[in-house]
Image (cartoon, grey):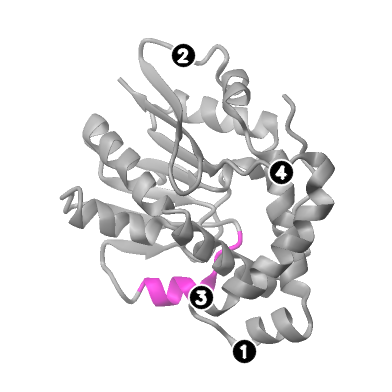
Amino acid sequence: MKRIHLFEFEDLKWFPNWIRICMTRLIMVMHKKFNTSEDMAKLLAKLIKQTNTSKIIDLCSGSGGPMLDVISHLKNIHKIKNVELILSDLYPNLEAAKRINQTDDSISYRTIPLDATNLENDTKGILTMVGSFHHMKPQVARNILVEVQKNNQPICIMEINKKFPIVLWWFFIPLSIILCLFITPLVKPLTVKQIIFTYLVPIIPICFAWDAVITSGRIYRMEDLDVLLKGLKTEHFTWEKGIIKGSSEKIYLMGHPN
């Protein structure tokens, strides 16, 4: 594989969770700009019909990600009315969980940490990972795919296919800092803390810019997915990968029992 697995601030255990939450809110803004929800809903509508399963467990949800809008699209555009969504994260956003758990009976956010690399027995349904699979090192990523196939569990993975040439990384980091300054007013909820540590003490833009650029080197490209899937394809389980064109290019990987 040609991917480069440098560190991201979001992955560090000691990283302050309030900064992590501020960054995941920025990521939600980016997903809206990239129409991630629409593309993910199309894939999930197909997967729901193939598996006759309408319970979705989203891994690494952060502040909710695009999955809240995905459920809206599934219900209103794809006419799948009985869909259920459970959000989860290794570092749950308890503020978002409180808000989400009070709004819609079909959507809930686990307040207990859930490790995507060590799933529990009650996590049965369609697993989703949106913009989070790149956080897994190759052996861990491979283990996740092996485990879901072993358990006959459907999964849908999507990543924004960002391509920053390594030689230009130091050029894109300041550009990403500037981008952060522009999109912060679109964050919901926009807190005083997010404003202060964006414009007065720019900790959030620096961390956001670093992670955004480093993600480019971590993304599993199509050929990398072939390596991860080597030996997994059987007549009892189907894997499908592809690229979605649009406002942004996205790579996806879906698996389901036959």
Gap between marks 1 and 3 measured at Cα: 14 Å
Q: Would you say the residues marked 1 and 3 are in contact, meaning their CB atoms lie under 8 Å apart?
A: no
At a point 72% along the width and 55% down the height, the residue shown is: 211
Secondary structure beneath label 3: helix
Would residue 120 be found to the left or right of residue 161 on screen? left
What segment carries the magenta color?
91-101
Frontmost residue, 30 versus 83: 30
Gap between marks 2 and 3 measured at Cα: 43 Å
Gap between marks 2 and 1 measured at Cα: 50 Å
- Which mark is first along the chain, 4 or 1? 4
Gap between marks 4 and 3 measured at Cα: 25 Å
Q: Would you say the residues marked 2 and 4 are in contact, meaning their CB atoms lie under 8 Å apart?
A: no
- Which mark is first along the chain, 3 or 1? 3
User: What residue is disc 1 on?
Assistant: 192
For the stretch drawn in magenta, what is the main secondary structure? Answer: helix
At a point 20% along the width and 52% down the height, the residue shown is: 77
Q: Nearer the observer, disc 1 or disc 3? A: 3
Reply yes or no: does residue 79 show up in magenta. Answer: no
Q: Which numbered marker is on residue 186? A: 3
Q: Amino acid at mark 4?
A: Phe
